[in-house]
Structure formats: structure tokens, C-alpha cells
Amino acid sequence: MLYASYLSKNFDVIAIAVSGDTKQSLKISHFLHLKSEKKAIPKFDDKFLSANDYLKAYENSEEKFRQDYNTLLEFTKELN
């Protein structure tokens, strides 16, 4: 999470955390840390996804839509 917080200063980041020694104790956590946001958001299920599934979930996430929408509103205010 610390590394993702540093990367999120310049990029949107999907962080994947895996812990456990056996299949039975395996725990997978996913977080979406959007560029310039202070906190990462827990996302996705508790299993690995394909790269395409991660990409689709990122592109269709409400948080990313909200961030893009707010950026667009700020830009239109500057134009006016």
C-alpha cells in the first residue's frame, strides 16, 4: 500500500496484496488508488482476475467516473 501511495501521485494504481502460506489460508485484497487521491479504495473480489478484467473494472468504476467528471467540471469552469 505504501508503494501504491507513492505511485498514485502520478498514476492511477491497482494494488494487489496476497498473504497466506497455503491455499486454504490464502487471502487476496485489491485496492484502487486513483491519481492524487489520499486513500485507496478496496475493490474487486477476493480472487485473482485476468488483466482484462482488472482493466474493465477500473474503466467502469464509479470512483474513476467521479474523478473524471469532477476534472471535466473544473476544466469547464476555467474555460468560462
Image (tube, helix red, strand yellow):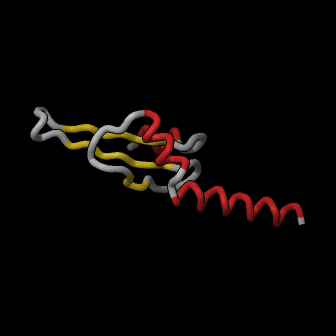
Q: Please state which of residues 33 and 28 is positioned toward the viewer in this rendering.
A: 28
Up/down of 2 relative to 70, above or below: above
| Location of residue 72 in the rendering, given as x and y in whole percent from the top left corner | 73, 59
Quadrant for residue 47, please give it: top left
Left or right of residue 10: residue 14: left
Up/down of 36 relative to 3, above or below: below
| Location of residue 56 in the rendering, given as x and y in whole percent from the top left corner | 50, 44
Left or right of residue 73: residue 4: left
Quadrant for residue 3, please give it: top left
Q: Quadrant of the C terminus?
A: bottom right
**Residue in the image at 52% along x and 38% along y:** 7
Q: Residue furthest right?
A: 80
Number of numbered tags placed on the structure image: 0
| Location of residue 6 in the rendering, given as x and y in whole percent from the top left corner | 50, 40
Quadrant for residue 54, please give it: top left
Q: Please state which of residues 13 and 5 is positioned toward the viewer in this rendering.
A: 13
Q: Quadrant of the N terminus?
A: top left
Up/down of 60 relative to 1, above or below: below
**Residue in the image at 57% along x and 48% along y:** 35
**Residue in the image at 58% along x and 40% along y:** 11
| Location of residue 52 in the rendering, given as x and y in whole percent from the top left corner | 46, 36
